[in-house]
Amino acid sequence: MDHDGVQLPNILSLTQIPVEELLHREPGTGLRFAQRMDLIGFSGLRKLLDQIRQIPDAIDLSVGQADFDVPEVLKEATINAVRGRCGRYSAPQGYPELIAATKRYAQQHYGLADDEEVMMTAGTSGAITLALMALVGPGDEVLVPDPYFVIYPNLVRLAGATPVFFDLYPDLRLCPERIEEQITERTRLLILNTPANPTGGAFTPEELSAVAELSRARQLPVLSDEIYEIYAYEAPHVSIKHFLGWQSLLISGFSKTYAIAGWRLGWAAGDPELIDKMRTLQLLLYVCPPTLVQQGVLAAFDVDMSATVARYRHKRDLLYEGLVDCGYEVIKPAGSFFIFPRVPWGDDLEFCEHAMAEKLIVLPGRFFSRRTTHFRMNFAAPDETLERALEVLARIARRPGVRS
């Protein structure tokens, strides 16, 4: 589609239905690629994001990263680390002083037990990769919520296992019965994400307690990705760690809280035996987490982010109320900085391509789901950008050619 002389990406040419059928294809290089590359449903999204970056003046609500700058105290601490001996390796699990500070934080906010262990990782995606490689392999099944963050099923496949999905639809809530329906003799792990990407959903203590009870009854460990824990708008964040202890692996990090997504530092906390296995794998894959960042984020634990969370609650309200006023069907996010409205007409590709013709960049829901009924928006953006987006969404709320 041509808009103001700019060739816009054609979403339909970059993806297929369903997302699981997106295959990795390379031009005729003569190389033979490993079969695992044919299992990754990610290339369509990668190509789309590459082309989006070339659209001038786009209202880009596609990529999930904070819109504020890194707090000055973290900058200064990191600069001081540069002036020191920051180029040397740390231990594979990270610096002891950062591990200790993170463990104190996890004990205070997540209910981590004294005898559980913590390690630093190369981002939360690195932590998830290590955990899956340690826990599952060929013939195993991993339960994944639908909608899901795009890396979950792909990393499960890379570990040799099979993702099995349980629905959060239609209310985007956690229902133990839907999970139990998918458990088989091959089920080895359950993945949770709260607050969630892409939905903005945050599970309640009652939901988490019920799932913890199921997990104990079925001897099913839980990997809980809680990277957005600071962005909880309706009630304080609660972790399944409070209810499940050693049988849950807690994964979080610093990137979303302090706007350091590109610095790549996460952490994992749980069973010491599992952390030891992950530490061994990290030594082989990454050697150690980024040492410069480890030294810089030691200052993070004293930074008050409450004003930022309040601003993001305002942005959530601005976008949610605007969508409702425009007639969109949408569940109000309780956390994170994402919202997941239902498309008002057509399917997700058709609607998102029409939005792109108006230079509004939102992502088709199929990148995060087996369904094609929703789209994802990131509201970590200036208020004026969100207001521009709502103007476009109001214009395209009805299918083109349909009169009001």
Image (tube, rainbow, N blue to C red):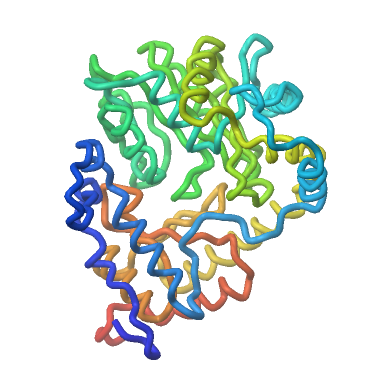
Decide: is 173 above or below 17.
above
Viewer-proximal residue among 128 and 402: 128
Viewer-proximal residue among 328 and 280: 280
The image position of residue 309, as x and y in percent, is 69, 51
Q: Residue furthest bottom?
A: 4
Question: Which image quadrant is residue 111 in?
Answer: top right
Q: Residue furthest front?
A: 30
Viewer-proximal residue among 324 and 144: 144
The image position of residue 83, as x and y in percent, is 81, 43
Question: Which image quadrant is residue 133 in?
Answer: top left
Q: Residue at x 46, y 54 (%)?
A: 331
The image position of residue 206, as x and y in percent, is 52, 28
Q: Give the side of residue 72 with respect to residue 165, left or right.
A: right
Q: Give the side of residue 315 with respect to residue 193, left or right.
A: right
Task: Name the quadrant of the N terminus.
Answer: bottom left
Decide: is 301 above or below 198.
above
Q: Give the side of residue 16 with respect to residue 82, left or right.
A: left
The image position of residue 192, as x and y in percent, is 44, 32
Q: Residue at x 29, y 35 (%)?
A: 165
Question: Which image quadrant is residue 174 in?
Answer: top left
Q: Is residue 207 visible?
A: no
Count of numbered labels shown in the rendering: 0
Q: Residue at x 38, y 32 (%)?
A: 175
Task: Name the quadrant of the C terminus.
Answer: bottom left
Q: Residue at x 23, y 54 (%)?
A: 26
Decide: is 332 above or below 291.
below
Q: Is residue 8 visible?
A: yes
